[in-house]
Image: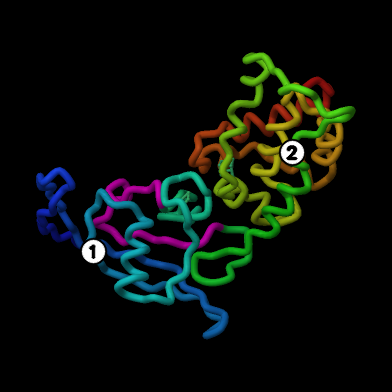
Amino acid sequence: MSTATVEKETTGTPDGGSAASHKISVTFRLRRFNPEVSAEVTWQDFRIDIDPKERVLDALHQIKWEEDGTLTFRRSCAHGICGSDAMRINGRNRLACKTLIKDLNPAKPITVEPIKGLTVLKDLVVDMEPFFQAYRDVMPFLITSGNEPTRERRQSSEDRERFDDTTKCILCAACTSSCPVFWNDGQYFGPAAIVNAHRFIFDSRDEGGEQRLEILNEKEGVWRCRTTFNCSEACPRGIEVTKAIQEVKRAIITRRF
Ligand code: SF4
Ligand code: FES
């Protein structure tokens, strides 16, 4: 077991004050894969000094910028909005930019690996194309017929509330890649696609609900779900993913939505 050593640094703040930064020595155990070098997957340890109040994304930046520039991972916003840095951290899907090191028991090595069920391209980067294809397949856009309205499409707050939860999705794939059905059968649409279908099926302004229900009634659709709740537990946006899937299942049976 690694031991954590503490050192104290004082840094300036914009208002001229000072803030104490307590760095500790933390081991990050990263899953490495570079098909241009070797077909073999390896684990590599990096021991760095870092403030445990920093995030896993900050540690990955520090490793890339100071230890090994070949380390490859995705990130963009760094603030939980773009959904590009979902990773398996200590065996659980999380966003690296929303995961504080102090919450991971940093006295022990922290493991970071790519999300499961999608082909690894390099290090922590997976091929997201099958994930986005499933998303496109459920037609995640408003479908209406007839003439363009001459003013905004009105909706009551009760009708808006009906699909509020599923509007929060950032397409990070943490849910889909935590689903055992998806691991075993990459053909399954997966929770994220169903969440995004839900967002439009239950929108009172939309007219494409029947079409989407037919798509999700196919053999790769909602009936593959085994209600394991992994998806709801993994979602960094707190979306009730399993509940959304259940609502779509019920809508297929009752045709009421
Ligand atoms: S439902 Fe949650 S976990 Fe799944 S893709 Fe959307 S934000 Fe990510
Ligand atoms: S980098 Fe955008 S969500 Fe983490």
Q: Which residues are magenta?
A: 97-115
Nearest to the observer: residue 57 or residue 78 = 78
Looking at this rendering, what residue extends furthest in the right direction?
A: 146
Residue drawn at x 42%, y 53% is 96
Res 2 label: 1
**Which kind of residue does numbered mark 2 sit on?**
Phe
Distance (Cα) linking label 2 and label 1: 50 Å
Instruction: Give the image quadrant in which the ligand numbered 1 is located.
Output: top right
Nearest to the observer: residue 1 or residue 183 = 183
Q: Quick check: is 108 in the magenta stretch?
A: yes
Image quarter of residue 199: top right
Residue drawn at x 43%, y 72% is 71
Image quarter of residue 187: bottom right
Q: Quick check: is 154 in the magenta stretch?
A: no
**Which kind of residue does numbered mark 1 sit on?**
Ser
Left or right of 132, for residue 11:
left
- Location of residue 78 in the rendering, given as x and y in whole percent from the top left corner: 42, 51
Q: Nearer the viewer, mark 2 or mark 1?
A: 2
Looking at this rendering, what residue extends furthest in the bottom direction?
A: 37
On the rendered image, what quadrant is the N terminus found in?
bottom left
On the rendered image, what quadrant is the C terminus found in?
top right
- The secondary structure type at the circle numbered 1 is loop
Residue drawn at x 53%, y 49% is 83
Left or right of 211, for residue 67:
left
- The secondary structure type at the circle numbered 2 is loop
- The residue where tag 2 is placed is 141
Q: In this picture, is 77 found above or below 47?
A: above
- Location of residue 122 in the rendering, given as x and y in whole percent from the top left corner: 54, 72
Nearest to the observer: residue 111 or residue 155 = 155
Residue drawn at x 72%, y 55% is 185
Count of numbered circles on the image = 2
- Location of residue 29 in the rendering, given as x and y in whole percent from the top left corner: 37, 66
